[in-house]
Amino acid sequence: MSTRTAELLASIALIVFSLGLMWTVHTDGLKIGWVPERGPGSGVWPFWLSLGMALTSLWTLVRWFRRTTPESRNEAPYIESDRFGLVAISFIALTAMIFLVAIVGTYISIALFLGFYMRFVGKHSWPMTSATVLGAVISIYFLFEWQLSKYLPKGLPMFEDGFLWLDNFRWEYFM
Amino acid sequence: MFEIADLLAAGLIQSFEPLNFAMILAGCMAGLFIGAMPGLGSVNGVAILLPVTFLVPPTAAIIFLAALYYGAMYGGAISSITLGIPGASTAVATVFDGRPMAQKGKANQAMMAAAIASFIGGTISIILFTLFAPPLAEVALKFGPQEEFALMILAFATFIGLGGDDIPKTIFSILLGLVMAAVGFDIISGKPRLIFFDMVEFQRGIGFLVLAIGIYGIGEMLWTLEQTGGKIKFDRVSATWAELKKHLGEIKKYLPTTSLSSVLGFFVGTLPAAGATPASLMAYGLAKTFSKDPDSFGKGNISGVAAPEAANNAASTGSMLPMITLGIPGSPTTAILLGGMIIWGLRPGPLLFANNPDFVWGLIGSMYVANFVTVALNLALIPLFVRVLAMPFTILTPIIFILCFVGVFATTDRMFDVWLMLVLGLGGYLLRKLNYPVAPAVLAIVLGPLAERSMRQSLIGSQGDVTTFISISEHPISLGCIVIAVVLMLYPVWSNYRRKIANKTAF
């Protein structure tokens, strides 16, 4: 996809998105004008500003047709093909990590993600990878769970139990 | 005057308390590191590390983040000089002469000039800050909702007039941020608004931090990966005491331009859209114009390194001025700091000086101390920071992604926000590639609720009369802000017209 096509698609998508926002304000039954005795209605802000979003995107679209934006004259690929792989794999791995949090919990998920990324994307040695993974997991546990008393998601009950044991151990000997 | 001196002394004492001093050290180190990494700047560091600062009380937290902001301005020069890629956009101008100096084998000289110029910039600007902040806060205390709203209009107008990005896309970005801020329960009527797909999670609104971390964490890393392909090359640098001593004799060569750049940087920094990047570019231009030897610029002139470095540090302090006194952030980084202050339960704006003097003066005091700490750390640890640059992106990227995820979850306790961060980060990255500026959206989501409230309060007060914002008898300050805002918004139209005329006469 060229940058030119990308700009066209983006400006159309943004017009649709802005109109969708305005429609949402309407279906929610929010007042977009002056409410007597009460002041401006609660829909005034989102409605008129969304209209502004739609108009500025329309403006971009018009300029796309007239080829006045630099992007509309740019036929180069939107994302360079030799870089696309790296960006895509990073984003997919990140999405997978967040998805796995619900199943195996924060720590295992982080370890898998970091291990995968360093070993297979970065081609780092196993010792280097394991040391970083271990360091990251321990520091996050220490910083968030311990110092900030934040309960990070632990996933399904069977994974959660393991951490209960760890938490008990911590409360018993370190608090 | 004596009152200020007293408060400042108290602030300085406060910044030497063990916890606060430790925060200064940690913040400066983190800032130097983040600034030095290509692609990462103060705004990324502040966004990603804000959740971690909930560990400490607000004063210590803001001291840490301010020191980080500051350190990142120093750190940016490191990769500009050794890699030839700016460590942050604020250090772009440092590349022009820093890189040629490094190629001539004078990287050490360039590095020291950058550090010392940053120190001068920091010192001059913090003195200006101390002098300007209390009277400005005093004036701002009299502001009503009309003035608040007009100031915000002015803040957004600076993006249109001075931001230098595509204008319809800049306006879109501002409006998008303002609309995102309206998601959730309406503060005045209590009605739910913009609950997309009837998902109850949207009732709590879209946190500014979710957007900021999405854009400056996830989006920025995707962007950097694409730009660099994950690989970087650099020159080795080492600094010794003997060289430093020798360099001190050269300071007078660049002292005049540096001082001028610092003052310029401070005032440019106070403008929301301008900030450190244009300040450093302007300072570079100024140094070149006033130089006796303008042709040597771009070929390794030491003033070409010193001027932008002084200006970017001064600008970072300058951007704190409207944040602390008016509650209007002077840069994307201070927008995130402002959002942080709201989370800590402080109300940014002029009342801070009256209600939370410990917070304000502790911060100001810490800025004096941080300036010394950073220059010392920077000069002492230059070789270490250069080694840090060798850290591959394949380690840095996943660690930043993990910090983004944990940071968002720890702040909001909802996986929903983590997913939202991912979507906003990807969206920000894709739009940024089409030249949509992202900073205005972040500023707008922070200011959105305040802007909407002040607009509605003004209109309720005036019975719906919109001329209340431009009434010369009742709200002259508001009128002034709006006039300047209109001029700023029309400025690009005018300069475009002039360019067309110039083109016509040229042919």
Image: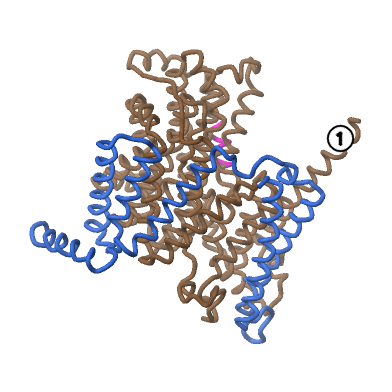
Chain colours: A blue, B brown
Relative to B467, residue B501 above or below: above
Image: magenta residue range: B260-268
- Say if A17 sits above or below B267 in the image: below
Q: Determine whether the residue tagged by mark 1 lies in a helix, strand or loop.
A: helix
- Taking the image as shown, residue B25 lies to the left or right of residue B304, namely left
**Does B312 appear in magenta?**
no
Residue B55: percent from left, percent from top: 28, 55
Mark 1 highlights which residue?
A: B503
SS assignment for the magenta stretch, majority = helix
Q: Quadrant of residue B78?
A: top left
Q: Nearer the viewer, residue B197 or B173?
A: B197
Residue displayed at 39% across by 60% down = A99
x, y percent for residue B201: 45, 73
Q: Residue at x 80, y 52 (%)?
A: A65
Taking the image as shown, residue B159 lies to the left or right of residue B55, namely: right
Quarter assignment of residue A79 = top right
Is B267 magenta? The answer is yes
Total numbered labels? 1
Q: Is residue A146 left or right of residue A153?
A: left
* Residue B168: x %, y % from top left: 71, 54
Q: Residue at x 86, y 35 (%)?
A: B502
Q: Position of residue B181 (x, y in %)?
A: 54, 66
- Residue drawn at (45%, 18%), measured in percent from left and top? B109
